[in-house]
């Protein structure tokens, strides 16, 4: 039995044929305060929001901010203490010492440093 094909028939159905269609690149105007990124089949819109804070009557001035920064710096550990705590943390992280032992050493050192600092400031 011989089969003939006519030009109107197709060998694949539309359900199995793989068709790609290029989406036309549309350029929308960027939104106020945002950016548009156009990619094939995807358009990403990044929006930003500006928040305006009005000048409040109780806003701190330069002198108050300097005082606050000095207070915070006074509470931070010195460079040597920060290195000590960092080394203690690294020793606990690499299991050279157990973490409860490292915590006890760190807390004990902080208490000793606080009492020494308090004695120096009272004298």
Image (tube, rainbow, N blue to C red):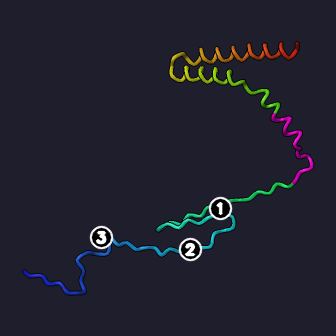
> Tags 1 and 3 in contact by the CB under 8 Å rule?
no
* Viewer-closest of 61 and 55: 61
Tell me which residue sits at (72%, 24%) in the image: 77
Question: In what element is the residue under mark 3?
Answer: loop
Q: Position of residue 114 (x, y in %)?
A: 77, 17
> In the rendered structure, which disc, 2 or 1, sits on the residue that comes first in sequence?
2
In this figure, which residue is indicated by the disc labeled 1? 47
In this figure, which residue is indicated by the disc labeled 3? 16
> In the rendered structure, which disc, 3 or 2, sits on the residue that comes first in sequence?
3
Q: Residue furthest right?
A: 57
* Viewer-closest of 7 and 87: 87
Mark nearer the viewer, 3 or 2: 2
Q: Is residue 109 left or right of residue 24?
A: right
Q: Position of residue 36 (x, y in %)?
A: 59, 66
> In the rendered structure, which disc, 1 or 3, sits on the residue that comes first in sequence?
3
**Above-or-below relation of 71 to 118:** below
In this figure, which residue is indicated by the disc labeled 2? 27
> Tags 2 and 1 in contact by the CB under 8 Å rule?
no
What is the distance, in whole Å, between disc 3 and disc 2 at their CAs? 33 Å
Q: Position of residue 33 (x, y in %)?
A: 69, 64
What is the distance, in whole Å, between disc 1 and disc 3 at their CAs? 40 Å
Tell me which residue sits at (88%, 14%) in the image: 122
Where are the magenta residues, as a range? 55-69
Q: Position of residue 2 (x, y in %)?
A: 8, 82
Question: In what element is the residue under mark 2?
Answer: loop
**Above-or-below relation of 16 to 7:** above
């Amino acid at each position: 039995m011989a089969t003939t094909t006519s030009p109107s028939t197709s060998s694949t159905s539309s359900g199995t044929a793989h068709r790609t269609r290029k989406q036309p690149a549309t350029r929308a105007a960027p939104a106020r305060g945002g950016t548009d990124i156009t990619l094939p089949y995807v358009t990403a819109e990044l929006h930003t929001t500006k928040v305006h804070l009005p000048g409040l009557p109780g806003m701190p001035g330069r002198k108050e901010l300097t005082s606050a920064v000095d207070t915070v710096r006074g509470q931070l550990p010195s460079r040597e203490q920060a290195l000590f705590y960092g080394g203690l943390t690294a020793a606990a992280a690499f299991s050279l010492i157990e973490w409860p032992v490292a915590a006890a050493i760190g807390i004990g050192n902080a208490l000793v440093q606080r009492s020494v600092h308090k004695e120096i400031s009272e004298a």
